[in-house]
Amino acid sequence: MADVYLDYNATAPVRPEAQRAIANVLAHAHGNPSSAHGFGAAARAVIASARKQVADALGAPPESIVFTSGATEANNTVLRHAAHSGAGGEVHLVSCATEHPAVLEELRALADEGCRVSILPVERDGRLDPERFEAALTPTTRLASVMWANNETGVVQPIAELAARAAARSVPFHTDAVQALGKLPLALETLPVAYASFSAHKLGGPKGIGALYVRAGVEL
């Protein structure tokens, strides 16, 4: 009997159309995209096309997409930015107990560096209570980070409401949206989300590729 692979929430096989796109770029777009010559222009065009495809999938403008090596780098970039940007004083970060280790482990590291970190528990249904979430926000909260869809339980958090409550308190909101892309309508520009992280290998793209959405006007 043939093996049956069912662990798509961990990683997905690279889809044939992705394989073809990669092979085409390797064969025909080998220029340095920073170069002024025609080969560089061709490489820049490929990157621009890829950026627009990702943006269209997220319901966001292309200029809001920053490519990374994966969601872990995207998550860490946002958390580190929140911890080390701005003036001095207390740095408070708020997140959820059911986050991916890419977020939780970085928060533990930042706590060791002196940040105050609030890890909120979830309710019996796995969702974060918006009232509990809002109550945890303080004047020193630099960032709130809540995963959109959980990779182990499938629980979908009320991201629109959480982000709105954070925005009402002038707290930037980040979501690890890796498991939401391709499964839920995102329309990021309609939500008060400042940052969102994504990874290609969860939905048939290659490993080592990710993206970070940064809303226009938001500092990074």
Image (cartoon, rainbow, N blue to C red):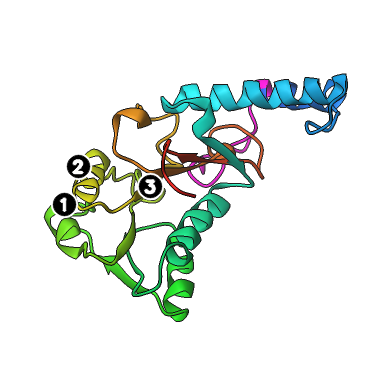
Please tell me which residue is depicted at 29% across the width and 46% down the height of the picture.
Answer: 155
Q: Are marks 3 and 1 in contact (CB under 8 Å)?
A: no
Please tell me which residue is depicted at 12% across the width and 55% down the height of the picture.
Answer: 131
How far apart marks 3 and 2 lie (CA) works out to 12 Å
| Most frequent secondary structure within the magenta stretch | loop
Report if residue 153 is visible in the image: yes
In this rendering, is residue 135 above or below 2? below
How far apart marks 1 and 2 lie (CA) works out to 7 Å
Residue 111 is left or right of residue 23, and the answer is: left
Please tell me which residue is depicted at 36% across the width and 32% down the height of the picture.
Answer: 188
Q: Which residue is mark 2?
A: 161
For label 1, the SS is helix
Q: Can you tell which mark lies on residue 96?
A: none
Residues in magenta, as a range: 1-17
Q: Which residue is mark 1?
A: 130
Q: Can you tell which mark lies on residue 175?
A: 3
Residue 122 is left or right of residue 143, and the answer is: left
Q: Amino acid at mark 3?
A: Thr
Q: Position of residue 45 (x, y in %)?
A: 71, 20
- Say whether residue 188 is magenta: no
3 or 1: tag closer to the N-terminus: 1
In this rendering, is residue 217 above or below 114? above
Q: Amino acid at mark 1?
A: Pro
Considering every residue shown, the one lying at the far left of the view is 131
Query: What quarter of the picture does the N terminus occupy?
Result: top right
Q: Are marks 1 and 2 in contact (CB under 8 Å)?
A: yes
1 or 2: tag closer to the N-terminus: 1
Front-most of residues 150 and 79 = 79
Q: Position of residue 217 (x, y in %)?
A: 41, 39
